[in-house]
Image (cartoon, rainbow, N blue to C red):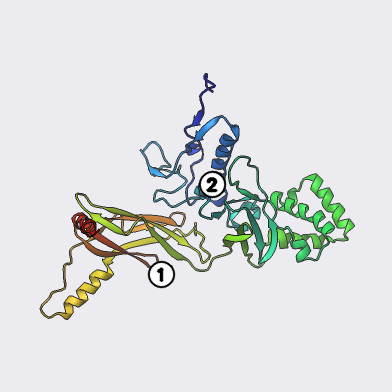
Amino acid sequence: VTPDMKKALLISESNGHMYPTKTFDDQAHRQEHALRHARVLDAAMADGGHVGCYQWCMFDYATHKDFGSGDGICYHGVMDSFRNPKLAAALYASQGEEVPVLEIGSSMDIGDYPGGMIGDVYVFTNAEEVELYKNDRFVTKLATGPFKALAHKPLKVDDTIGALLESVEGFSEEKADALRPILLSAGRNGINNLPLADKLKMAYAMQRYKLSYEDGVALYKKYVGNWGGESTVWRFDAKTAGHLVASKTLCPTHKLHLEATPSHTTLTEGEVYDMAAIRVRLLDENGNVASYAQLPVSFSLAAGKAKKAKKKDAEKNSEGGAGDDAAVLAIVGPDIATAEGGMCGTYVRTCGNAGTAALVISTPQTDPVTIEFTVVRKDEVQKDAFRKDVDA
């Protein structure tokens, strides 16, 4: 690769156009996107000959007509255009230490996968260990996965049966150990496509433990297929030093709510206008992004609380008017946007006037969210700072 072995290598770009990923792609695609970032970063760190690794890229972005996905957007980012994180962003977040991170590479819904076969699922976390529970029953502690050098490796969920054969079915440890790998193989390959070795193991186990064909089908339906069965609640508990630091619950959703995160809520009007970004996500009752909630999200501006109070006081004064109604903020972009992958966003900017204003965000299926903004003049901020210096 290099003629000078005394100089370190720097990977300047990887992934990108090799695996563009939209927030509304299916779960298997989004997880593979995250794993590709993990594999490149892990390999570079394990190699010992690389000084660093840049991966393309942080955000989706607008591009020219001859690139992108036909809509003028490059979907190469680990975040979308509004800085909402895709699953791949959790890989990078999980390499930090201060804030607990726990993201799951699947909703665990069998109906989102061909043949109901979920396959391997990965968990992105910086916790020391993660425990898996099914309907509040302990299943297993997650394995480490096929990574070597990452500080916090994605954990592989390759056993969704675990201790349940003993705790629920009352099987002996020997019997559970014989049947578990066969059932897991059926989940990965399909019951009609079991490898010959697993078919032989199944025949031996059924004969040894006197299981009928109906018994085998019942176990498959309960622990693998679950078509027509009661909905399953999966819980992932992340622990460090024995203490719970994060938890994720995955189950069919019944109610959505809006989450709106502004970059800042105090804007300064000076020689130029100031702006704030607002990231919007649709979440289920467990705080998970509802990635298939492609709902229209409406944005509108209203008077802020301070301005409403001023107007109310002015109306009480027979000599006074209703106060200054000059615009304080303006929405940058459309009044209605689609929550692609359950996420979108908008921007607001100042209009030359100080005061307060509120941004109201709503959808047809959720309660609205209101964000209060305060706009101050730069000269007033400088005067306040000067007064504080004088006082000091």
| Looking at the image, residue 317 lies above or below residue 391 | below
Q: Earlier in the sequence, mark 2 or mark 1?
A: 2
- Hey, what amino acid is under mark 2? Gln
Location of mark 2 (residue): 95
Residue 297 badge:
none
Query: Distance between the Cα atoms at labels 2 and 1?
Result: 35 Å
Q: Residue at x 54, y 47 (%)?
A: 95
Density class for disc 2 (Cα within 10 Å; few <14, some 14-19, many ≥20) is: some
Location of mark 1 (residue): 367
Q: Residue at x 50, y 34 (%)?
A: 52
Q: Secondary structure at mark 2?
A: loop
Density class for disc 1 (Cα within 10 Å; few <14, some 14-19, many ≥20) is: few
359 sits to left or right of 34: left
Residue 319 x, y percent position in the rendering: 10, 78
345 sits to left or right of 166: left
| Looking at the image, residue 19 lies above or below residue 96 | above
